[in-house]
Image (cartoon, grey):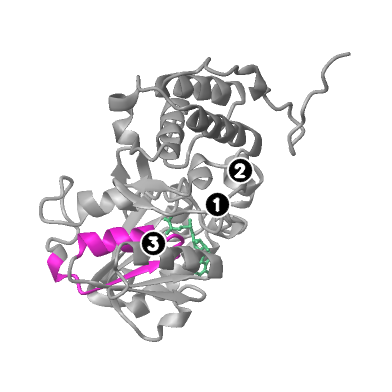
Amino acid sequence: MAKPTKKTARGRAAPDLAKVGPGELLTLLDFVRYAVSRFVEAKLSFAHGTTDPVAEAAFLVCEALHLNPDQFEIFANARVSAAEGKTLLDLIHQRVTTRKPAAYLVNKIYMRGLPFYVDERVIVPRSFIGELLESHFGADGEAGSLIDDPTAVERVLDLCTGSGCLAILAAHHFPNAAIDAVDISKGALEVAARNVGEYGLEDRISLYRGDLFAPLGGNRYDLIITNPPYVDAEGMAALPPECRAEPKLAFDGGADGLDVVRRILRDAPDHLTPDGGLICEIGRGRELVDEAFPELPLLWLDTEDSEGEVFWIAAADLG
Ligand SMILES: C[S@@+](CC[C@H](N)C(=O)[O-])C[C@H]1O[C@@H](n2cnc3c(N)ncnc32)[C@H](O)[C@@H]1O
């Protein structure tokens, strides 16, 4: 009699990992190679801190073994113990069958080289703003500077903070700044509080729960950073399973994706200092934003992996 096929929750046949016999996979490299084969076979999506199956597999294998993914090459030919091998096969299996991003399976992601705790209460950090803080907000920024002296920045606001990753990167980049960080989600703020605590930044980063600027009274900031929800209705309907494992609230920007961005642009002038500015990620909606706000001289910023997905506007130009 034919063996019954295991079905996943989504109705696809699950790979039969029992076909990996004891001792068939020996080294880290063997497990990474095996994971890549399974990931490609299952047509997974990669957009959560890694952008291809090899990087995703190396990340998952290394993190599960408590190694920094940067150390993969050093340990590639090292043997894995039987117990470790079982853990790795289980994680590879979970990645394929649940379609959860690897970062959720190991509760960790790196952004600009810094580790952050993550779970399903927050989107997996991948904002381009992390890179832009380094490239555009310092005297030695390669691409010309929007704020020449990071030490002179006194107050920063991170709107829609999620895991708190951008607030924490900002705290490192602007060493004298007090940072407020807002999110509407209680769960996200719990994760942010954990990350702020792990970096010992409780004295510099204050977390607020509420709708955009609502919990901040009349506070004004030298810099507002925001990676708000900006996916339009069409994009929401087409999100890959990996993104559907993340909070809907982190993506949903209404019919045209700009519901939250419009409110931020409307209210930001009341919360910026005269020499301040706003940096906002909006994904692929640049044309729409340019059409919706023709009067605003938005400066579109590029990163290594993105073109025109983030804009900067000085307080003076916001009116
Ligand atoms: C795209 S995620 C960004 C998270 C984080 N800043 C990052 O870059 O990884 C957007 C976040 O905005 C939060 N959010 C959505 N609507 C909001 C609102 N009206 N006010 C405050 N936060 C909101 C969501 O809970 C989510 O954590």
Mark 1 Cβ inside 8 Å of ligand 1: no
Pointer 1 residue:
231
Q: Nearer the viewer, mark 3 or mark 2?
A: 3
Q: Closer to the camera, 154 or 290?
A: 154
Q: Which residues are magenta?
A: 151-174
Instruction: Using the image, tell me which numbered label, if any, was put on residue 239.
Output: 2
Describe the element under mark 1 as helix, strand or loop: loop
* Residue 71 in the image: above or below residue 197: above
The answer to which image quadrant residue 181 occupies is: bottom left
Amino acid residing under circle 2: Leu
Near mark 3 (Cα within 10 A), the count class, few <14, some 14-19 or many ≥20, is many
- Classify residue 223 as left or right of residue 207: left
Asked if the residue under mark 2 is in contact with the one under mark 1, i.e. CB atoms within 8 Å, the reply is: yes
Indicate the quadrant containing the C terminus: top left, top right, bottom left or bottom right. bottom left
Residue plotted at (54% across, 66% down) = 187
Q: Nearer the viewer, mark 3 or mark 1?
A: 3
Pointer 3 residue:
195
Residue plotted at (26% across, 71% down) = 316
Residue at mark 3 to residue at mark 1: CA–CA distance: 26 Å
Residue ranking furthest to the right: 1
Near mark 2 (Cα within 10 A), the count class, few <14, some 14-19 or many ≥20, is few
* Residue 269 in the image: above or below residue 82: below
* Residue 51 in the image: above or below residue 169: above
Residue at mark 1 to residue at mark 2: CA–CA distance: 9 Å
Dot placed on the residue nearer the N-terminal end, 3 or 1? 3
Residue ranking furthest to the bottom: 217
